[in-house]
Image: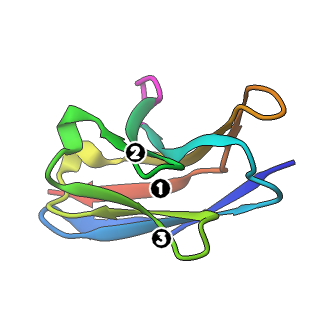
């Protein structure tokens, strides 16, 4: 069983920066990717950025050039550095992990609120 715990959300002014961190407990052996999704009120959950075990990354077009995803030294952590934040980045951010072994399964954190004021 994998548990994901996020930290680092908060309130920031437009143009500011925040760093989100997620730590996975339990075995992540056989994982496909770790990453971040977000959900704003009235919207569907959407991909922000993911990183694979091999280090490949994928970003939403809306955050390219502003957000950077990375894995921590412990390898069971994933960080999201968010720069040049905009009010439209306001959402609950969820850490996500997908495993393919022993079977395909998605895991989610409890979410952390990010609010960007104009």
Q: Are marks 3 and 1 in contact (CB under 8 Å)?
A: no
Kindly identify which residue carries mark 1.
113
Q: Which mark is residue 8?
A: 3
Q: Residues within 10 Å of mark 2 (few under 14, many from 20)?
A: many
Q: Which mark is residue 91?
A: 2
> Looking at the image, is mark 3 or mark 1 earlier in the sequence?
3
| Quadrant holding the C terminus | bottom left
Residue at (39%, 57%) from the top-left corner? 114
Q: Nearer the viewer, mark 3 or mark 1?
A: 3
Expressed as whole percent of the image width and height from the top left, the position of residue 30 reads: 72, 43
Q: Are marks 3 and 2 in contact (CB under 8 Å)?
A: no
Q: Are marks 2 and 1 in contact (CB under 8 Å)?
A: yes
Between the residue at mark 2 and the residue at mark 1, the CA separation in whole angstroms equals 6 Å
Q: Residue furthest right?
A: 1
> Looking at the image, is mark 3 or mark 2 earlier in the sequence?
3
Between the residue at mark 3 and the residue at mark 1, the CA separation in whole angstroms equals 9 Å
Q: Give yes or no for residue 44 being in the magenta stretch.
A: yes
Q: Nearer the viewer, mark 3 or mark 2?
A: 3
């Amino acid at each position: 069983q994998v548990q994901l715990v996020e930290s680092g959300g908060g309130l920031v002014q437009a143009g500011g920066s925040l760093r989100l961190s997620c730590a996975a407990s339990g075995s992540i052996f056989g994982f496909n990717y770790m990453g971040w999704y977000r959900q704003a009120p009235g919207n569907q959950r959407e991909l922000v950025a993911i990183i694979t075990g091999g280090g490949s990354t994928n970003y939403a077009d809306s955050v390219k050039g502003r957000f950077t995803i990375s894995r921590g030294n412990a390898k069971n952590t994933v960080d999201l550095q968010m720069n040049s934040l905009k009010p439209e980045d306001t959402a609950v951010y969820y850490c996500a992990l997908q495993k393919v072994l022993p079977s395909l399964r998605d895991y989610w954190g409890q979410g952390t609120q990010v609010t960007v004021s104009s």
